[in-house]
Amino acid sequence: MSDSSSKIVEACNLLTDVKNLVEVLFMAAADISNERQQSAIQYVCDIADERIATINALLNTACKQL
């Protein structure tokens, strides 16, 4: 495996870790009694999920080009 390939694999693994952390944060937000705070955290999680999906697509494209 080339150095570029291994870096892409490492980035994918880190991205999976981040996605899992965002999911945990989203679930934890459900326990917040203040609805505005809960909504704000869940909104940020939604944005993070969108960014993660975009980065994942870019990494997949990069993998195919190697």
Image (spheres, rainbow, N blue to C red):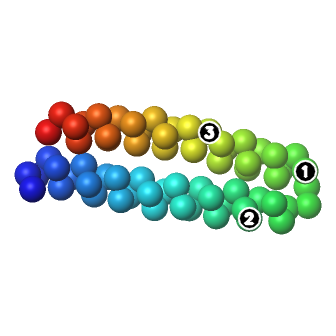
Q: Secondary structure at mark 3?
A: helix
Quadrant in the picture for residue 28 = bottom right
The amino acid on which the numbered mark 1 sits, given as a three-letter code, is: Glu
Distance CA(mark 2)–CA(mark 3): 16 Å
Residue at (14, 47) in percent of width and height: 4
Mark drawn on residue 28: 2
* Image position of 14 (left or right of 49): left
Q: Secondary structure at mark 1?
A: helix
1 to the left or right of 9: left
Residue sitting at 82 percent across and 52 percent down? 38
Dot 1 crowding, Cα within 10 Å, few <14, some 14–19, many 20+: few
Q: Quadrant of the N terminus?
A: bottom left
Question: Residue 43 at what x, y percent from top left?
Answer: 72, 42
Residue position for label 3: 47
Query: Where residue 63 appears, x then y in whole percent?
Result: 23, 41
For label 2, the SS is helix
Residue 20: name its quadrant.
bottom right
- Distance from disc 1 to disc 2, alpha carbons, whole Å, reads 13 Å
Q: Pick whichever of labels 2 and 3 is earlier in the sequence.
A: 2
Badge 3 amino acid: Ile
Q: Dot 3, crowdedness within 10 Å: few (<14), some or many (≥20)?
A: few
Residue type indicated by callout 2: Ala
Q: Position of residue 56 (x, y in %)?
A: 40, 42
Residue 58 image offset from top left, x and y in percent: 35, 35
Q: Give the Cα separation between the discs numbered 1 and 3.
A: 18 Å
Tell me the residue that label 1 is attached to. Answer: 35
Q: Residues within 10 Å of mark 2 (few under 14, many from 20)?
A: few
Which of the marked residues, 1 or 2, is nearer the chain's N terminus?
A: 2
